[in-house]
Image (cartoon, coloured by chain):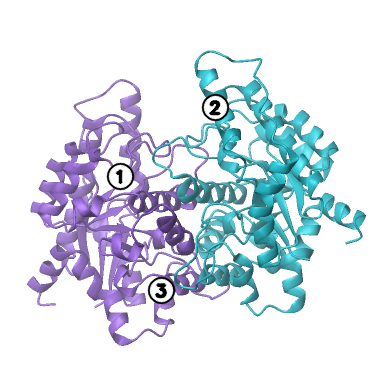
Chain colours: A purple, B cyan
């Protein structure tokens, strides 16, 4: 099987985005509770949207299944208050649950969390548990609920521990994934996303988080931000700062996806990062949607880059399927239930 | 010649750092003007420090000259007010001027600017002009004077234009270089540095800055942050956002150094970025100072990685000397005056 660990439901109908805009506007006008529900998207509409986009691309590219979560850029945790974030997260997660129910062999559900700047992450547990009961296999975790101002504590702070305890209990990994940026300095997919990945990796390097939570698993998307490109810097910083070697301290708990949109980047990723720590991902339909004029193929068709690596069959299998089944045991169980 | 475009005077005596600490402490106690001067470092002390460190390494590694600027992590633009930043910048730049006078063949001076969060960048012009008269060949420009909170406008905003006009007039490039981070989320050299580079490149991608300032030249250090690793993402984003191709829009004005501390990173950098846009740099003695146990060589001995590329003699010359002389015409003039 070929399992894409990183996809968002970016192709929702326009009126779904409009609903969220209206909610944000209402909040600005003083409506801080009693939020109205989103308009219902019919099953037919869901099918049409997905089959014209994600499923079409899955078939064209030979991807069997995608770990599917709400639009990252639309999580917008900085908007409103915690109650609004709770409401919006339930709305988005329920939509993902419906998608996974319509296409259980195509999409495994991943939830967003009702984070809010300054709000204790323990407030996310109820929604995380609800999603686990609905069959979700993982969550996205925003390291910067302020969406570009980085006002909450680092991810290695005890502030986050209640959530980590629950993740460990549920045996769920988290993908570290920022939302859009409300800081004009940071373009969303061109800066804030990549910076978020780099920032959190460095936080982890400095900390003993995985001594406290030895079975916690974090996926750092977008090829690990800048980290593999600067792998020498990170190995050196760990050494200079008296931290244990990265392979020992982090690489039983941290995974990078393959959302790197050109061959040289994928070459480097798999040259410096052990295959066991790399999960196939494309984030389609996502940040970059067009055709690379240099190759004639979609920038985000990352499967091609991986296939061009000439990995051994064992390594290629690990990267496309084996690793993700290990890191996401609930996915593995779900697949086994389907006889896969 | 082999010219390192990126070095900071990181090996100042401890009492120089202590002086700055005291200045910051005094400010916190209410001393917002009339700052006392730094203790004088004797010529002998300067010589001893440099010959035991930077010059020793230059000789060991075969580097002829370094573009030398004040300690980036100590610029600390968020501390105090604009007047304190003016005072501290003059202090640091005067020290660099002394170093360049003691060792004109070893160090070409690069200044820091008296930036301050919210302070108009035009306030830096006087110090920039003073440094130009003292023989400085370039400046470092902090894209985030708040040092980790990113509260000033993007570098492409007209806010920065007075400074760009002066740089163009003086025919000086600027190296985009953040200082230390006062945001606990961002480790300085492990996150804030790299994020700063990535952030500014994306700002430039979105803007027509170089149409307004066709001769402005910006050096993005640390191998361009995450950019070369994600070159496909940036090419794709430019295309999807209706921006011109990167090669056309940015690559007559933007340069990356080679501060990437392992061979695979340097391989990727020179595979995706045209040689004309790459300047040799090591940032020694800087972020990573130890020996890579995998190679037995210093992580930051970037010259070795470049020599291992097997570039043509023309390309290698461009990367080690030719490009930097083009991008820094005042350096070129200085070298010609020395018969080089």
Among the 4 quarters of the image, the one containing residue A43? bottom left
Left or right of residue A214: residue B26: right
Q: Position of residue B332 (x, y in %)?
A: 84, 55
Quarter of the rendering occupied by the N terminus of chain B: bottom right
Chain letter for the residue marked with disc 1 in the picture: A
Q: Position of residue B160 (x, y in %)?
A: 67, 35
Among the 4 quarters of the image, the one containing residue B313? bottom right
Among the 4 quarters of the image, the one containing residue B42? top right
| SS class, disc 3 | helix
Task: Compare marks 3 and 1 and give the one earlier in the sequence.
Answer: 1
Q: Which residue is mark 2?
A: B79
Q: Name which residue lies at 39% across and 51% down.
A: A202
Q: Position of residue A163 (x, y in %)?
A: 18, 44
Judge the density around disc 2: few (<14), some (14-19), many (≥20) Cα neighbours within 10 Å. many
Q: Which residue is mark 1?
A: A155
Chain letter for the residue marked with disc 2 in the picture: B
Front label number (2 vs 3): 2
Judge the density around disc 3: few (<14), some (14-19), many (≥20) Cα neighbours within 10 Å. many
Q: CA distance from mark 2 to mark 3?
A: 42 Å
**Do the residues marked 2 and 3 share a common chain?**
no
Left or right of residue A126: residue A88: right
| SS class, disc 1 | loop
Judge the density around disc 1: few (<14), some (14-19), many (≥20) Cα neighbours within 10 Å. many
**B196 up-or-down from A301: above or below:** above
Q: CA distance from mark 3 to mark 1?
A: 26 Å
Front residue (pair B41, B312): B41
Q: Is residue B2 visible?
A: yes
Determine whether label 1 and label 2 are within 8 Å by CB: no
Chain letter for the residue marked with disc 3 in the picture: A
Q: Which residue is mark 3?
A: A270
| SS class, disc 2 | loop
């Amino acid at each position: 099987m070929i399992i894409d660990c990183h996809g968002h439901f970016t192709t929702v109908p326009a009126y779904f985005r409009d609903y969220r805009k209206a909610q944000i506007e209402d909040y600005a006008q003083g409506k801080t509770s009693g939020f109205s529900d989103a308009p219902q998207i019919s099953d037919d509409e869901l099918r049409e949207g997905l089959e014209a986009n994600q499923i079409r691309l899955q078939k064209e590219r030979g991807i069997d299944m995608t770990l599917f979560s709400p639009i990252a850029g639309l999580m917008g945790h900085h908007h409103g208050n915690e109650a609004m974030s709770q409401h919006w997260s339930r709305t988005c997660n329920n939509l993902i649950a419906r998608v996974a129910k319509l296409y259980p062999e195509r999409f495994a559900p991943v939830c967003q969390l009702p984070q809010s700047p300054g709000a204790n992450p323990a407030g996310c547990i109820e929604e995380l548990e609800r999603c686990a009961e609905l069959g979700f296999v993982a969550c996205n975790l925003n390291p910067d609920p302020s969406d570009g101002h980085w006002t909450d504590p680092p991810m290695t702070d005890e502030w986050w521990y209640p959530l980590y305890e629950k993740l460990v209990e549920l045996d769920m990994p988290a993908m570290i994934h920022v939302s859009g940026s409300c800081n004009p300095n940071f373009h969303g997919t061109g800066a804030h996303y990549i910076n978020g990945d780099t920032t959190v990796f460095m936080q982890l390097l400095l900390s003993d988080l995985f001594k406290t939570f030895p079975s916690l698993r974090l996926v750092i998307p977008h090829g690990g931000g800048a980290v593999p490109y600067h792998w020498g810097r990170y190995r050196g910083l760990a050494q200079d700062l008296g931290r244990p070697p990265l392979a020992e301290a982090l690489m039983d708990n941290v995974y990078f996806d393959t959302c790197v949109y050109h061959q040289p980047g994928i070459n480097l990723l798999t040259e410096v990062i052990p295959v066991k720590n790399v999960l196939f991902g494309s984030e389609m339909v996502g940040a970059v949607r067009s055709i690379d004029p240099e190759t004639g193929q979609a920038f985000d068709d990352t499967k091609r880059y991986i296939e061009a690596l000439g990995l051994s069959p064992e390594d290629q299998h690990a990267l496309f399927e084996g690793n993700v089944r290990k890191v996401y045991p609930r996915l593995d169980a779900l697949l086994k239930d389907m006889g896969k």
